[in-house]
Image (spheres, grey):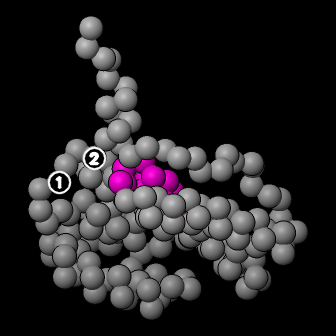
């Protein structure tokens, strides 16, 4: 089942709020056809309001991918069990936060925000585990802890061969 702005499956208020944002930003021709909510997110994230660097372009693309995947994965078929439905929607929501924090680690330069991104990754992973354990669900596969990934600009500089 696909979630559209016309859908009323659990997130009607969020869809209305998002629709108001979409109407303000997207061309009316685009809004004339029903689209997946994820399509709206991707279109909004593609809009830039000033020139952006290659690193920012990559960062925005990674974020759009994470948010689109999150919205698609949060589109569940209600099971009749509120607790299971909550976890089914919250796990992709937390995974989206993890992926967005990973993008910040790849491209961001602010040390305080990089540390915060690492904390987000760890705490969101812990909460996913706690939610699954509460329902007796299998745990996600182990993942490495976030490391001190240098910003993308440093990654590129470090990968360039040095002059002879």
Classify mark 2: residues with Cα within 10 Å, few (<14), some (14-19) or many (20+).
some
Count of numbered marks: 2
Task: Tell me if residue 94 is in the magenta stretch.
Answer: no
Is residue 143 placed above or below 2 in the rendered structure?
above
Closer to the camera in the image, 6 or 99 = 99
x and y percentages locating residue 64 in the rendered image: 37, 59
> Residue at 68% of width from left, 80% of height from top?
86
Q: Magenta segment: does it hold 100?
A: yes
Quarter of the picture holding the N terminus: bottom right
Residue shown at 31% from the left, 31% from the top: 157
Q: Is residue 67 left or right of residue 30?
A: right
Residue 133 locus on image (x, y percent): 84, 69
Q: Which residues are magenta?
A: 95-109
Instruction: Give me the disc on residue 154.
Output: none
Residue at point 78%, 71% (across, down):
130
Calculate the distance from the C-alpha at mark 1 to the C-alpha at mark 2.
Answer: 8 Å
Crowding around mark 1 (Cα neighbors within 10 Å: few <14, some 14 to 19, many 20+) is: few
Provide residue 16's location: percent of width, then percent of height.
37, 88
- Residue 77 lies left or right of residue 45; in this view the side is right
Viewer-nearest residue: 65 or 105: 105
Which element type, helix, strand or loop, lies under badge 1?
loop
- Is residue 44 positioned above or below 6 on the image? above
Q: Can you give x and y, in whole percent of width and height, for residue 83 in the image?
A: 76, 82
Q: Which residue is mark 2?
A: 55
Residue contact between numbered discs 1 and 2, judged by CB atoms under 8 Å = no
| Residue at the spot 11% in from the left edge and 56% down from the top edge | 51
The residue carrying mark 1 is: 52
Q: Quadrant of residue 95?
A: bottom right
- Camera-nearest residue between 25 and 105: 105
Helix or strand or loop: what does disc 2 sit on?
helix
């Amino acid at each position: 089942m696909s979630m559209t702005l016309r859908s009323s499956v659990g997130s009607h208020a969020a869809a209305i709020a998002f629709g108001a944002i979409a109407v303000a930003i997207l061309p009316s021709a685009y809004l004339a056809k029903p689209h997946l909510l994820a399509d709206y997110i991707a279109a909004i994230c593609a809009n830039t309001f000033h020139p952006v660097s290659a690193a920012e372009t990559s960062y925005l693309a990674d974020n759009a991918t994470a948010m689109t995947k999150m919205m698609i994965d949060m589109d569940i078929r209600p099971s009749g069990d509120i607790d299971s439905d909550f976890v089914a929607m919250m796990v992709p929501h937390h995974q989206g936060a993890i992926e967005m924090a990973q993008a910040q680690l790849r491209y961001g330069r602010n040390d305080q925000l990089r540390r915060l991104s690492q904390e987000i990754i760890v705490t969101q992973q812990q909460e996913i585990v706690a939610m699954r354990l509460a329902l007796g669900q299998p745990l996600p596969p182990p993942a490495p802890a976030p490391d001190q990934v240098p910003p993308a600009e440093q990654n590129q500089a470090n990968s360039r061969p040095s002059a002879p």
